[in-house]
Image (cartoon, rainbow, N blue to C red):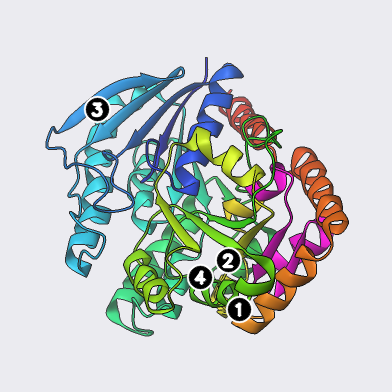
């Protein structure tokens, strides 16, 4: 039996999009006859949401997947500083490498999921020193996004060193997985890449995320990371402008770095009865919360370096049969057009309010868009299909070894 080791910074019970993605793909691979070990830190994200753990390593099994938790520094609060976060990101891949070295003979393929960029450390050593097959799963242009959001200075030493390491990873991996075609184009335009690329979208579990029979509530929903890349402030102000005629509530499901700032905005706008923060909830509850909502929102900020992104939440909205209102250009706009399930608004509260009002005034159109989204997600974005594509690549590597 082929055995695969997946190195990921996030894994359930964390609620991030990539935690669920890695879980779903790992479980599907096990169901297809691939032995899978996932190596991850103790649950940490959103930072401050989980208790710190101090054991060097913990082993367990989740739905047939072997899970190894390796100690790393865990930031203690949502607003942890730069040093604390970097320790979290840097200690884990070093620990993962030290764990992998003595057990490497057990595995045929190593998969590293980025971001963060540093998960590539054990993959690079496994490839160059141990001669293992290496699949580099790239979900995000982490360096570019960090510069755009002000976390890294352009042309700084941090940027230059990070780009050199990213170039090494891209040059030596045996396969590069990308979540969107635009992400692949941007990688090849910036870096020297001769490695084969495979489209592996974030996708969605269309069995778990499916329309329910619950009645609709007068609410829109955001389900995901409450982070810097999301233009949630303008959605809040849009909801305020729709208060009178539409009696609308805005449900924010999740947690993240900017939640407290957003809560302060809601209080200052006297919207505490209209904007509801649920915090992190069990994954199994989210499909029902989406299905009973009228519209899902995915408001990416208008930043050029985010144009390659399609947030996981968009696939979840479509799979649950509700339309989405997005902000941003590039891949999210392409998906809205191609699926017929979404509308893109400019990054202003007025534009978002206008699009929401247009949908709320046309229940038949919302229903049509919801059906289109469900059908598109089922045919094109199911995570079992992503796992099957990955299995085929792993099997091809097996034949190359013979």
Say whether disc 4 or disc 1 marks the residue closer to the N-terminus.
Answer: 4
Query: Looking at the image, is 18 positioned above or below residue 356?
Result: above
Say whether disc 2 or disc 4 marks the residue closer to the N-terminus.
Answer: 2
Alpha carbon distance from label 3 to label 1 = 60 Å
- Callout 1–callout 2 Cβ contact below 8 Å: no
- Callout 2–callout 4 Cβ contact below 8 Å: no
Alpha carbon distance from label 2 to label 4 = 28 Å
Q: Quadrant of the C terminus?
A: top right
Pointer 4 local density, CA inside 10 Å: few below 14, some 14–19, many at least 20: many
What residue sits 20% from the left and 55% below the top? 75
In the rendered image, which residue does mark 1 sit on? 241
Dot 4 lies on which element? Answer: helix
Dot 1 lies on which element? Answer: helix
- Give residue 388's quadrant in the image: top right
Alpha carbon distance from label 4 to label 1 = 14 Å
What residue sits 57% from the left and 25% below the top? 29
Q: Is residue 44 left or right of residue 4?
A: left
Alpha carbon distance from label 1 to label 2 = 40 Å
In the rendered image, which residue does mark 3 sit on? 102
In the rendered image, which residue does mark 2 sit on? 187
Pointer 1 local density, CA inside 10 Å: few below 14, some 14–19, many at least 20: some
What residue sits 76% from the left and 38% below the top? 378
Name the disc covering residue 232, or none.
Answer: 4
Say whether disc 2 or disc 3 marks the residue closer to the N-terminus.
Answer: 3
Residue 338 falls within the magenta-colored stretch: yes
User: Picture coordinates of residue 309 (x, y %)?
Assistant: 60, 63
Query: Looking at the image, is 149 positioned above or below residue 11?
Result: below
What residue sits 34% from the left and 73% below the top? 264
Name the disc covering residue 278, or none.
Answer: none
Q: Is residue 342 left or right of residue 44?
A: right
Q: Nearer the viewer, residue 60 or 118?
A: 60
Residue 234 showing in the rendered view: yes
């Amino acid at each position: 039996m082929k055995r695969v080791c997946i190195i990921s910074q996030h894994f359930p019970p964390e609620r991030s999009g990539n935690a669920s993605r890695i879980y779903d793909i790992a479980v599907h691979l096990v169901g297809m006859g691939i032995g899978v070990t996932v190596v991850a830190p103790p649950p940490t994200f959103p930072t401050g949401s989980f208790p710190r753990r101090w054991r060097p390593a913990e082993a367990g099994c989740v739905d047939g997947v072997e899970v190894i938790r390796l100690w790393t520094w865990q930031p203690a609060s949502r607003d942890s500083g730069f040093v604390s976060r970097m320790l979290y990101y840097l200690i884990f891949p070093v620990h993962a490498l030290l764990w992998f070295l003595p057990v490497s003979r057990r595995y045929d393929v190593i998969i590293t999921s980025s971001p963060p960029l540093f998960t590539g450390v054990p993959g690079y050593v496994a490839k160059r020193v141990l001669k293992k097959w290496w699949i580099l799963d790239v979900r995000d242009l982490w360096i570019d996004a960090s510069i755009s959001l002000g976390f890294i200075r352009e042309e700084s030493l941090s940027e230059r060193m990070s780009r050199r390491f990213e170039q090494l990873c891209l040059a030596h991996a045996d396969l590069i997985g990308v979540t969107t075609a635009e992400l692949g184009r941007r990688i090849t335009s910036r870096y020297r890449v001769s490695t084969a690329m495979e489209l592996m979208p974030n996708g969605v579990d269309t069995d778990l995320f499916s329309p329910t029979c619950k009645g609709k509530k007068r609410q829109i929903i955001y389900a995901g990371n409450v982070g810097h890349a999301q233009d949630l402030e303008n959605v809040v102000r849009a909801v305020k402008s729709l208060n009178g005629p539409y009696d609308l509530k805005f449900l924010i499901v999740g947690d993240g770095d900017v939640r407290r700032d957003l809560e302060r905005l809601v209080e200052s706008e006297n919207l505490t009865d209209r904007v509801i923060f649920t915090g992190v909830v069990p994954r199994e509850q989210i499909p029902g919360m989406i299905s009973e909502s009228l519209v899902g929102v995915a408001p990416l900020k208008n930043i050029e370096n985010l144009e390659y992104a399609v947030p996981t939440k968009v696939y979840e909205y479509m799979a649950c049969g509700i339309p989405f209102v997005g902000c941003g250009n590039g891949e999210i706009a392409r998906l809205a057009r191609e699926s017929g399930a979404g509308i893109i608004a400019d990054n202003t509260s007025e534009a978002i309010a206008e699009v929401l009002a247009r949908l709320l005034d046309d229940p038949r159109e919302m229903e049509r868009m919801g059906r289109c989204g469900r059908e598109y997600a089922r045919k094109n974005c199911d995570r079992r299909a992503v796992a099957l594509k990955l299995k085929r690549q792993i099997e091809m590597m097996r034949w190359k070894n013979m």
